[in-house]
Amino acid sequence: MSVMTGEGALAVFAQAKQLERQGRSIIHLELGEPDFHPPNSVLEAATQALREGKDRYCPVAGIPALKEELAQYLHCTRNLSVSPENVVIAPGCKIALFLAMMALIEPGDEVLYPDPGFPGYASITLGLGGIAVPFELSEKNHLQPDPDEIAGKITPRSKILLANSPANPTGTVYTDEVQRRIAELAVKHDLLVLSDEIYARIIYGESYKSLLSYPGMEDRTLIIDGFSKSFAMTGWRLGYTVAPPHIVPALVMLVMNTYTCVAEFTQYAAIEALRDREQATPKMVKEFARRREQFIGDLNRVPGFRCAPPEGAFYAWVNIIETGTTAEEVCRIMLEEAGVAAIPGAAFGPAGKDFVRFSFASSTATLKEAVDRIQKVSTAWQATLANR
């Protein structure tokens, strides 16, 4: 436990909630939580399942109907051919990620992961006795992984490569060239790949391409995905892993020894979410695209802020080096003086130290007010620049 770390977003959220309890007005741009809710058809499916008594123990890896629906969903949205037998349902993506890593990592194994990246990657690796090896997503490389850097960090102890596209916190969608090179490295060095695809449906450019679709990746790639982001079902705690057949039994054994099964009635609701008869997900992504355009433009008018539009997810990754102060101080000023909660980039790894992450999963009016508040308190770091 001593080598594991918390999550910056939740720590900032706790500070912000404490200020709210003191009567302060806080705009929450720290959590990656869509401000949408599932359509009525999903709620009705859950209600109907409860009425029908679907509140019992159910198959450990997930109900067959949901696994079959997920296989069809992945074929339609990512052009993947996945067997339902290779799908394991989990109560959220974090536990899916944790159990996948627990099944694969032995003490001393090296895990390559993106920096900046989701804090759990390094934390879980260290907690399981592995060695966390970061590769940088740098501005000079347009926040894309550098396959040459990754290649230079592979050793005989390298076991797993973690990929996250679209990425948290940068919003990066890996290019086809980068993914092809990653796949080639994985095959050459016999690496397992954990492809975190939780934001796969939230992209603002071309259609999404999974790492699983590249040559040689079928028997070495595990997809981690879920319903929190693409279907606005954060509190439902629904995730899943798609794994090669030889890894599935290990995941099932871990399920038996942990959560037993996922709530049956939520799984039936998830089937309805995947069918998306109301086109709720495309409508939500269209709204995120509008917010992205407005929010990024407004942020770039804040003195000392510089931000490129993200290609996916709903995060603004803002370079604040020109403010002349630290990201931690910028976030403190914004929270305590402006009532705007955001996350210092170092919470996502050392490579994020000169950045701040904002979530734009809020209304356009809320985002506009947030930037207006930030503009007013930006005099604090403008004064710092003037005195240099």
Image (spheres, rainbow, N blue to C red):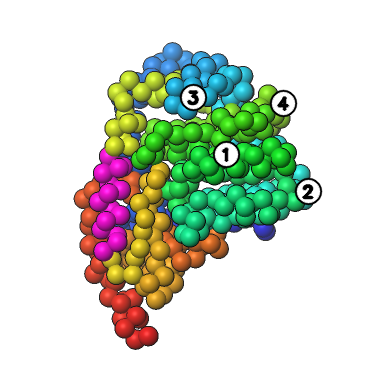
Which residue bears the numbered disc 2? 156
Question: Which residue is the site of mark 1?
Answer: 180
Q: How far is the residue under mark 4 from the one under mark 3?
A: 22 Å
Q: Position of residue 330 (x, y in %)?
A: 38, 69
**Magenta residues, start to end:** 287-301
Q: Amino acid at mark 1?
A: Arg
Mark 4 and mark 1: span between their CA atoms?
24 Å
Q: Amino acid at mark 4?
A: His
In this view, the mark in front (4 or 1): 1
Circle 2 — which element? loop
Amino acid type, callout 2: Pro
**Tag nearer the camera, 2 or 4:** 2
Q: Are marks 2 and 3 in contact (CB under 8 Å)?
A: no
Estimate the spatial distance between the alpha carbons at disc 1 and disc 3, rounded to whole Å.
Answer: 16 Å
Quick one: label 2 or label 1, which is nearer the N terminus? 2
Q: Is residue 132 visible?
A: no
Disc on res. 246: 4
